[in-house]
Amino acid sequence: MRGSVSTGSKPAPSDLLHGTAVAALLVGNADSRSPGLVPQAELVAVDAFQKVAQDQRMDAFALIEALDYLTAQNVRIVNLSLAGPPNAALAGQVGQMAAADILMIAAAGNGGPRAAPAYPAAYDAVLAVTAVDRRGQVYRRANRGDHIDLAAPGVNVWTAASIRGARTKTGTSYAAPFVTAAAALLWQRDPSLSAAQLRDRLRASARDLGADGRDAIFGDGLIAAPPPC
């Protein structure tokens, strides 16, 4: 999200690379180099980003419009691989979605250990996901704070780099899909679970990392894949 965007002319559309990488992590293509975590899942993808110089940005109004659209599509789980400053209107939209029993999972942000909390991850109704490497070490640029809920792989994660190519990606944006995939598998097995119950199960099954118990770096710990049926 990176804050709001204001230009004198119509902004350029996003280059789709970030969204493609996140989507490929989730659903991918079984016959490609990016098979996906839940390849059979139905994905509703919304691109509300704009290209500003070499960056991809989104204003709060575009994000709210995108979330409102997803709500209208009756989605149950929303992956938010983006981060930005707090916004009162966005907080209201998040509250409405929580009341509609929608589970929201968001990237914690890549501002660094001393950065202020990033949103929407820092809202209470949203699961905030940080990134770790293969050794369970936190990504050096990941945001920290008491709002962090879970950790997931997000350092040198293999995924799509374009429509045809693939490469490794790093950041909390790429950690969030691992939690989203775990939530989707849990919900698939038991569609009666509420968003709150999904949250509780994901956090309760996490493997503790760092200091004993919940902490400001890893939250409740590393996301665990649901056991086979």
Image: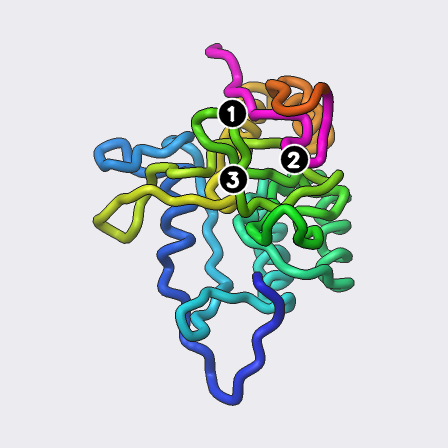
Q: Is residue 115 above or below residue 201?
A: below
Type of secondary structure dominating the magenta stretch: loop
Q: Earlier in the sequence, mark 1 or mark 2?
A: 1
Magenta residues (range): 213-229
Residue 96 rendering spot, x and y as whole percentages: 75, 51
The residue that disc 2 covers is: 217
Q: CA distance from mark 2 to mark 3?
A: 10 Å
The residue that disc 1 covers is: 185
Q: Residues within 10 Å of mark 1 (few under 14, many from 20)?
A: some
Q: Is residue 127 above or below residue 2?
A: above
Element type at mark 2: loop
Residue positioned 71% across, 25% down in the render: 200
Q: Is residue 152 above or below residue 105?
A: above
Left or right for 86, reference 47: right
Residue 205 rendering spot, x and y as whole percentages: 63, 18
Q: Are marks 3 and 1 in contact (CB under 8 Å)?
A: no
The residue that disc 3 covers is: 139
Visible in this render: residue 193?
Answer: no
Q: Could you tell me the amino acid type at mark 2?
A: Ile
Residue positioned 63% across, 20% down in the render: 208
Residue 206 rendering spot, x and y as whole percentages: 61, 21
Q: Could you tell me the amino acid type at mark 1?
A: Leu
Compare residues 131 and 126 and report the one nearer the observer. Answer: 131
Q: Could you tell me the amino acid type at mark 3?
A: Tyr
